[in-house]
Image (cartoon, rainbow, N blue to C red):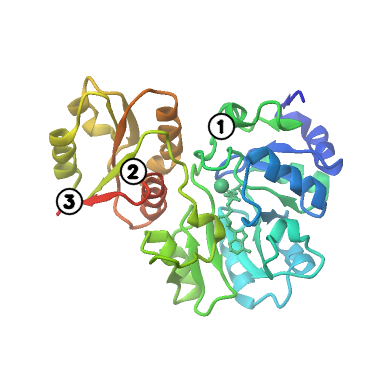
């Protein structure tokens, strides 16, 4: 099929694609999504086909306002509204008990469903115009880095989707934070634009799922099915170096070979002259690092490097989301520098 390039003024055409059961590339503030009518199992099935996504990996539903929660979720706790009040519209997905009529195609047969109210103005217009809950995973081929521009999404999806709306580069750059409110205490399943510290300021105690830090033991299943897959992975193996950035840069320099690429903080780029280098952002600016992490990983997919070394921020604030994405790309191959 031909993928229609749509602009911001074409929101009605975009909504129409969703209403007719088609697939739409949608800008959100986190990453581009691959959207379809979340109440239409056939349309949802086409998402899995286009992405090559395993059937056991559930999708999240995107809604225009928090008062839609009751339509798709049962026993919505007060904590969900407290989170919505503080962080919606925004980069937070809340796992809740689902209602019966939410298609199994969306939830992969689980009795819970992930709900998110996105902040991107075009995304909000499209969802409102469609009048539907939009099922949307990240718009990449399964296993590849999530797309943060329309061009990156087209690299993976051109010819496989009906249309894409170009809403500019994503302002957050990593996917939404996922918190499971059906667990007690609530559990962080994926770190993202809303930080763990912010979640705790509303919820009190929040547990961190082992899949976030990569410390799953053999045979253990993460609670977010998608977290078990090696992800975002360029073709070359990635090694993450954490700890003091100065010492980390020295470590990388001591181990780097011809044919190695580097993902580093901006300040350290000159040290790696002669190697393909992708900038993560200034060492002190984690929000900027979040905006660049997927682009850096995607860039190396198109090069012939044999291995990739990556500097990595500490876990405070949105650093947890940046390090999680790098660590997943590295298959949790991490070197901790004292
Ligand atoms: O920022 C985002 O969340 C983006 C944009 C497009 O909204 N979407 C996104 O979707 O990242 P996706 O499908 O790439 O990641 C959703 C994650 C997967 O790891 C999936 O396993 C998990 O959410 N998930 C979905 N429903 C769940 C549920 N009921 N229980 C536990 N995990 C769930
Ligand atoms: Mg994804």
Q: Give the distance between the C-alpha atoms of the residues marked 3 and 2, in whole angstroms.
A: 20 Å
Q: Which residue is mark 1?
A: 149
Please state the total of marks drawn on the protein image: 3
Q: Secondary structure at mark 1?
A: loop
Marks 2 and 1, how far apart in space? 21 Å
Q: Residue at x 18, y 49 (%)?
A: 244
Residue 104 falls left or right of residue 335: right
According to the image, label 3 marks what residue? 337
Element type where label 3 sits in the image: loop
| Nearer mark to the viewer, of 2 and 1 | 1
- Cα separation between marks 3 and 1: 33 Å
Q: Mark 3 near mark 1, Cβ–Cβ under 8 Å?
A: no
Q: Residue 113 location, x and y as percent?
A: 67, 64
| Closest to the observer, 148 or 275 | 275
Q: Residues within 10 Å of mark 3 (few under 14, many from 20)?
A: few
Give the farthest residue toward the top: 274
Quarter of the N terminus within the rendering: top right
Q: Nearer the viewer, mark 3 or mark 2?
A: 3
Q: Which residue is mark 2?
A: 285
């Amino acid at each position: 099929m031909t993928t229609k390039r749509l602009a911001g003024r074409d929101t009605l055409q975009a909504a129409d694609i969703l209403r007719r059961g088609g697939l739409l590339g949608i800008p959100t503030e986190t990453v581009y999504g691959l959207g379809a009518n979340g109440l239409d199992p056939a349309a949802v099935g086409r998402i899995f086909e286009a992405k090559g996504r395993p059937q056991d990996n559930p999708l999240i539903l995107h809604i225009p306002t928090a008062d839609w929660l009751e339509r798709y979720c049962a026993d919505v706790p007060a904590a969900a509204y407290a989170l919505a009040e503080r962080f919606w519209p925004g980069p937070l997905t809340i796992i809740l008990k689902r209602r019966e009529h939410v298609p199994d195609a969306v939830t992969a047969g689980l009795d819970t469903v992930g709900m998110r109210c996105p902040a991107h103005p075009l995304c909000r217009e499209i969802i409102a115009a469609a009048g539907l809950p939009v099922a949307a995973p990240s718009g990449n081929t399964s296993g590849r880095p999530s797309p943060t521009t329309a061009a990156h999404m087209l690299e993976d999806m051109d010819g496989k989707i009906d249309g894409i709306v170009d809403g500019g580069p994503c302002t957050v750059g990593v996917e939404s934070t996922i918190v499971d409110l059906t667990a007690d205490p609530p559990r962080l399943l994926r770190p993202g634009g809303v930080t763990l510290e912010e979640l705790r300021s509303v919820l009190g105690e929040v547990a961190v799922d082992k899949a976030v830090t990569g410390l799953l033991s053999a045979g253990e299943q993460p609670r977010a099915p998608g977290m078990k897959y090696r992800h975002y992975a360029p073709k070359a193996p990635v090694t993450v170096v954490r700890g003091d950035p100065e010492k980390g840069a020295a470590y990388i320099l001591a181990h780097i070979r011809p044919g190695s690429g580097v993902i580093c903080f901006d300040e350290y780029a000159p040290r790696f002259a002669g190697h393909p280098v992708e900038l993560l952002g200034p060492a002190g600016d984690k929000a900027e690092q979040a905006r660049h992490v997927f682009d850096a990983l995607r860039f190396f997919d198109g090069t012939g490097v044999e291995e990739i070394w990556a500097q990595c921020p500490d876990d405070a604030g949105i650093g947890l989301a940046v390090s999680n994405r790098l660590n997943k790309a590295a298959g949790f191959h991490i070197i901790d520098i004292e």
